[in-house]
Image: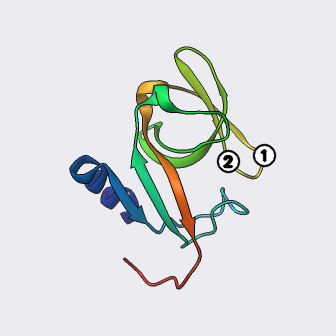
Amino acid sequence: MGWVKDALKELNEYGVCQIRPHGGSMRGRIESGQLVTIEKIDGTAVHLDDVIFIKWKNNYLLHIAKEINDTEILIGNNLGKINGWIPKENVIGKVIKVEDGSKKDS
């Protein structure tokens, strides 16, 4: 997951990053290798159906905010799987743009 390391570094330095994540859990919304722009946000700024960049069980994911309460967010993928609740403090960023185009490595 080289994209995670790059995303964390760039979000900490610049507050925004562009990455090309790989995987199939967000298929239909984000295809493997598409150019994704993430903006650093606080967990309190998440809205339902946002795609968020989160820390999850010693790993990092791009997943969808399915439900939100005062302190937690229920996350799931775009294929119908619900992963579980995370504390809002585990939110790192929010996807603000997904682009098509060549899958050139960045």
Q: Residue at x 56, y 64 (%)?
A: 98
- Could you tell me residue 19's position as x and y percent? 42, 65
- Could you tell me residue 53's position as x and y percent? 48, 46
The quarter holding residue 50 reads: top right
Tag of residue 26:
none
Q: How far is disc 1 from disc 2 in space, using C-alphas?
A: 6 Å
* 89 up-or-down from 79: above or below: above
The quarter holding residue 49 reads: top right
Q: Is residue 1 visible?
A: no
Q: Residue at x 59, y 76 (%)?
A: 100
Q: Residues within 10 Å of mark 2 (few under 14, many from 20)?
A: many
Answer left or right for 75 relative to 19.
Answer: right
Q: Is residue 19 visible?
A: yes
Outermost residue toward the right? Answer: 80
Q: Residue at x 65, y 63 (%)?
A: 24
Report if the CB atoms under discs 1 and 2 are less than 8 Å apart: yes
- Could you tell me residue 42's position as x and y percent? 40, 31
* Amino acid type for the residue under numbered disc 2: Asn
Outermost residue toward the top? Answer: 70
According to the picture, the residue beneath numbered tag 2 turns out to be 77
- Look at the numbered disc 2 and give the secondary structure of its residue: loop
* 23 up-or-down from 42: above or below: below
Outermost residue toward the left? Answer: 13
* 10 up-or-down from 52: above or below: below
According to the picture, the residue beneath numbered tag 1 turns out to be 80
* Amino acid type for the residue under numbered disc 1: Gly
The quarter holding residue 91 reads: top left
**What quarter of the picture does the N terminus occupy?**
bottom left
- Look at the numbered disc 1 and give the secondary structure of its residue: loop
Q: Residues within 10 Å of mark 1 (few under 14, many from 20)?
A: few
